[in-house]
Image: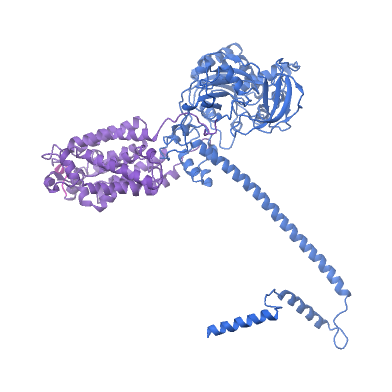
């Protein structure tokens, strides 16, 4: 009568993968709403398209690999990866750009390594970086937020745009570089911080709209911390190390350096700190290791933003830190009970 | 006592979990005495250590408290008949063991008279420490917290160390189990007396009685007993309810802030700890000359009608207790899951036929549909580290799992697999619902088996090499002997004569060397001594080759 039972403990598990992933999805909601508010509902279309595609690809690959499809699909890990990926892309991305990126995310980033739990690199960042390197033009122009441009794309326009049903040139006047990009270009042209901030793109802290979106990620991140979906070490280390560098350089040359608060509320640092760097599969797994891992990411983000060839550096920073995870984990093992 | 209860400084141990206690159900009724069953099944080994040998024969009448099996090994505890009756058989019978394998048991048909053997009068004040330990040993007392290590062996060993702190462990941190709780409520005086005897043996500087703070009635009872029958230098400590604070390592850390060093015992840092139930058994052994023939067993879980605690004779079948507890909630027999011990560290029972033994603190009856659905499938580890957060040994269970899965056993030891106490916390919190502890148990037994095999093969190799050496030596000796013999013969043989009839010593020597060389040069060849036919064939082949070449 008991041969079917495994050994103890015989206590119902208190967590599930699905619960964790749903928590992450809930955490993404405030920032996503802010995004749609300032840049139009097109982002929701992109997310939906990416998610459907990712789940379909996941199901197909699982079938090819002779793995059970339902339990893997319903852990919602593909949904989270696709959602994060869609948030990284410019809003006026054509469908094929998203498809190529999701393909890389799911097939190369995740399943070629063995699926969830075995991938050394953050799958969404793999897909994103492939696009960033292969299609630099498509990946660096963004719409103006609602208060700055004349209009934002409505729902039907967004769908039409996504699938190339309209001439994209029609909206060329609405797009520009991101505030982070503008800052970089401006500083390169020897403009001062205050001169650059004259541009209507800039809000009180970061860029118009962008600062609210970053605030949304922060709120979602706090939700993840409260629900213990993630631990504090990685986000705190990422934000603290980047801020520390930003503060040091800002104090040295305040007129020719991006202000620290602008750094915190621009680009991908906030979503990166709470949602991307904290991907448990690819992050360091020891408490101490997570701090080093976070510090490394924050450091790399600042270095790439300030001296690198890209306006933002979260994706590269995360991938580089992913590579160092085995080393970090090996040297940060905790002291075992009774070990002297 | 109550003031020290608040003032005592506690320390934190890493990890642990707050689990649902489920303890109230079995505490609704007072401790009861379980009725005698018709038959007792007493396994020969109910402790850690050497198995006992039976001292009785089939058909022999035995009395309550009579020794029926014993061993000469220092790490063992004798078995006594728990009631009077006739030995029916000594045979293999299902016993409660994680392996599920049966073992030798003495089966006694009870006569219901419960006749006891003659008890001896003792002058308690005059007993020396070794005499006290001897009495405890002869009563078959083992650690009743679950490990069942022979108490006398532990005490004799501890006497080689300076024991400064005596810990009486009444934490009882596993869910459902309340046998220690009710024991402290019911037998508080005997428990304090038992602690007193340990104090007499070791003379420690302090005694700490630790009880988890979810047992207010036990705390009150012990506090009352300490007030009426005081024990010197004793502090009653209410510790926070946090699984597994009853584990020896965790309790030592909680109470003293010290850690038992890896690979050492609590003695090494001057600490001796005993379970509260063991203290009661010690008192009974010394004062009443009463052997360990019964223990308190909790019967609980959502599959039983009337949970409670029963003072049960050892050897009583679990089914008998189930009946006393009102039977199963569900009528269908196969819808029950029986566990001996708690839900975190207990093990499944093959059936209700197995007997209660010295280590049986709890019978957990669970309805099958409420046990976690754990089919063969589980998600993969996502390295979230929740397991590391709760691990009381401060291990990295996620890394252990990774190595165990890859069967990288030389690496897994570097991650301190053998410091795992199998408390089960990691398995419970794992979001991928991986039965982690099961992987560690498997890895541990694999490594133990490999070490055993290694030991065996090392020994075999050593034996083989010794044999080779011996044979070589024998050969050399034989050769030496033959040489001496040969030389002796050669001297007698007529020497090579020259043409002139005289012996040329130079020529003779040369001949000998030549012969020796020839002997050495001879190599077996398959081209010598060929028949004419073979020779012909070879020549034909050579000719053919030559033709081809041209």
x and y percentages locating residue B258 in the rendered image:
53, 31
Q: Is A99 above or below relative to B150?
A: below
- Residue at (67%, 49%) from the top-left corner? B459
- Is residue A202 visible in the rendered image? The answer is no
Which residue is at the front of the view, B3 or B443? B443
Q: Position of residue A20 (x, y in %)?
A: 36, 34
Taking the image as shown, residue A267 lies to the left or right of residue B256, namely left
Q: Position of residue B181 (x, y in %)?
A: 55, 18
Is any atom of residue B153 visible in this view? yes
- Expressed as whole percent of the image width and height from the top left, the position of residue B90 reads 72, 29
Residue B384 sits in quarter: top left
Colour of chain B in the rendered structure image:
blue
Q: How many marks?
A: 0
Instruction: Identify the residue at the far top of this view.
Output: B228
Is residue B13 magenta-colored? no
Quarter that holds the N terminus of chain A:
top right
Q: Magenta stretch: residue A192 in it? A: yes
> Residue at position x 16%, y 50% from top?
A189
Query: Residue at 74% of width from left, 61% of height from top?
Result: B472
Instruction: Answer with the quarter of the image where residue A297 lies.
Output: top left
Asked whether, in this view, residue A202 is left or right of residue B451, the answer is: left
The chain letter of the purple chain reads A
Q: Which residues are magenta?
A: A190-196
Image: B143 above or below A291? above
Please tell me which residue lies in front, B15 or B458.
Answer: B458
Relative placement, left or right, of B151 versus B368 is right
Q: Is residue B143 above or below residue A202?
A: above
Color theme of the render: by chain
């Amino acid at each position: 009568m008991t041969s079917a039972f495994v050994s103890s403990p015989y206590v119902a598990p208190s967590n599930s993968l699905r619960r964790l992933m749903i928590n992450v999805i809930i955490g993404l909601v405030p920032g996503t709403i802010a995004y749609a508010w300032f840049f139009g509902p097109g982002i929701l279309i992109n997310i939906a398209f990416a998610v459907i595609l990712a789940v379909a690809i996941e199901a197909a690959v699982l079938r090819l690999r002779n793995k059970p499809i339902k339990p893997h699909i319903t852990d919602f890990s593909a949904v989270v990866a696709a959602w994060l990926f869609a948030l990284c892309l410019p809003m006026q991305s054509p469908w094929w750009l998203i498809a190529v990126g999701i393909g890389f995310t799911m097939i190369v980033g995740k399943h070629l390594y063995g699926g969830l739990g075995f991938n050394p690199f953050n799958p969404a960042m793999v897909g994103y970086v492939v696009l960033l390197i292969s299609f630099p033009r498509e990946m660096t122009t963004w719409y103006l937020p609602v208060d700055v441009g004349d209009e934002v794309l409505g729902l039907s326009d967004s769908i039409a745009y996504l699938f190339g049903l309209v001439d994209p040139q029609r909206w060329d006047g609405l797009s520009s570089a991101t505030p982070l990009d503008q800052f970089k270009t401006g500083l390169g042209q020897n403009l001062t911080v205050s001169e650059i901030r004259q541009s209507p793109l800039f809000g009180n802290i970061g860029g118009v709209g962008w600062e609210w979106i970053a605030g949304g990620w922060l709120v979602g991140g706090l939700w993840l911390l409260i629900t213990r979906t993630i631990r504090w070490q990685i986000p705190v280390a990422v934000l603290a190390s980047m801020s520390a560098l930003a503060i040091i350089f800002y104090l040295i040359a305040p007129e020719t350096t991006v202000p620290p608060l602008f750094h915190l509320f621009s680009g991908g640092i906030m979503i990166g700190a709470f949602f991307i760097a904290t991907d448990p599969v690819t992050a360091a797994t020891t408490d101490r290791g997570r701090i080093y891992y976070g510090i490394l990411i924050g450091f790399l983000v600042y270095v790439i933003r300030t001296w690198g060839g890209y306006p933002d550096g979260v994706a590269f920073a995360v991938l580089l830190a992913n590579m160092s995870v085995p080393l970090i984990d090996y040297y940060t093992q905790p002291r075992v009970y009774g070990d002297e | 006592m109550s003031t020290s209860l608040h003032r005592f400084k506690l320390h934190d141990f890493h990890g642990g979990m707050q689990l649902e206690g489920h303890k109230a159900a079995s505490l609704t009724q007072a401790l009861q005495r379980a009725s005698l069953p018709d038959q007792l099944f007493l396994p020969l080994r109910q402790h850690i250590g050497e198995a006992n040998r039976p001292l009785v024969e089939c058909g022999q009448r035995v009395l309550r408290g009579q020794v029926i099996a014993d061993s000469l090994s220092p790490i063992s505890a004798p078995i006594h008949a728990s009631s009077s009756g006739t030995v029916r058989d000594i045979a293999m019978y299902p016993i409660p063991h994680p392996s599920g394998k049966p073992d030798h048991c003495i089966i006694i048909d009870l006569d219901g008279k419960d006749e006891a053997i003659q008890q001896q009068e003792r002058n308690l004040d005059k007993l020396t420490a070794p005499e006290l330990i001897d009495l405890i040993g002869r009563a078959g007392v083992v650690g009743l917290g679950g490990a069942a290590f022979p108490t006398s062996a532990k005490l004799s060993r501890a006497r080689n160390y300076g024991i400064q702190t005596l810990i009486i462990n009444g934490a009882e941190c596993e869910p459902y189990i309340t046998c220690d709780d009710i024991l402290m409520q019911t037998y508080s005086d005997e428990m304090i007396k038992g602690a007193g005897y340990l104090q007499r043996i070791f003379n420690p500087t302090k005694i700490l009685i630790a009880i988890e703070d979810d047992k207010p009635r036990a705390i009150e009872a012990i506090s009352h007993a300490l007030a009426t029958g005081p024990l010197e230098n004793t502090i009653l400590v209410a510790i926070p309810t946090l699984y597994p604070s009853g584990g020896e390592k965790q309790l030592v850390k909680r109470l003293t802030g010290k850690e038992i060093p890896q690979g050492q015992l609590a003695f090494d840092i001057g600490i001796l700890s005993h379970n509260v139930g063991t203290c009661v058994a010690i008192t009974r052994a010394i004062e009443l000359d009463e052997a360990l023939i019964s223990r308190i067993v909790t019967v609980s879980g959502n599959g039983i009608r009337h949970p409670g605690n029963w003072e049960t004779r050892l050897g009583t079948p679990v089914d008998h207790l189930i009946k006393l507890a009102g039977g199963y909630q569900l009528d269908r027999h196969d819808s029950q899951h029986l566990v001996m011990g708690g839900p975190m560290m207990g093990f499944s029972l093959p059936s209700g036929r197995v007997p209660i033994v010295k280590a049986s603190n709890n019978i957990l009856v669970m309805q099958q549909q409420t046990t976690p659905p754990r089919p063969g499938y589980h998600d993969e580890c996502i390295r979230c580290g929740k397991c590391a957060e709760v691990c009381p040994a401060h291990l990295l269970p996620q890394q252990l799992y990774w190595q165990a899965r890859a069967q990288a056993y030389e690496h897994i030891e570097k991650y301190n697999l053998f410091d795992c106490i199998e408390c089960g916390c990691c398995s419970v919190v794992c979001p991928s619902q991986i039965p982690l502890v099961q992987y560690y148990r498997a890895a541990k037994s694999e490594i133990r088996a490999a070490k055993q095999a290694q030991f065996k093969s090392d020994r075999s190799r050593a034996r083989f090499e010794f044999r080779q050496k011996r044979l070589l030596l024998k050969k050399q000796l034989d050769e030496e002997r033959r040489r001496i013999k040969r030389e002796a013969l050669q001297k007698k043989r007529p020497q090579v004569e020259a043409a002139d009839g005289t012996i040329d010593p130079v020529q003779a020597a040369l001949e000998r060397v030549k012969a020796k060389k020839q002997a050495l040069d001879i190599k077996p060849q398959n081209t010598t001594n060929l028949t004419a036919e073979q020779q012909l064939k070879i020549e034909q082949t050579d000719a053919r080759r030559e033709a081809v070449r041209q």
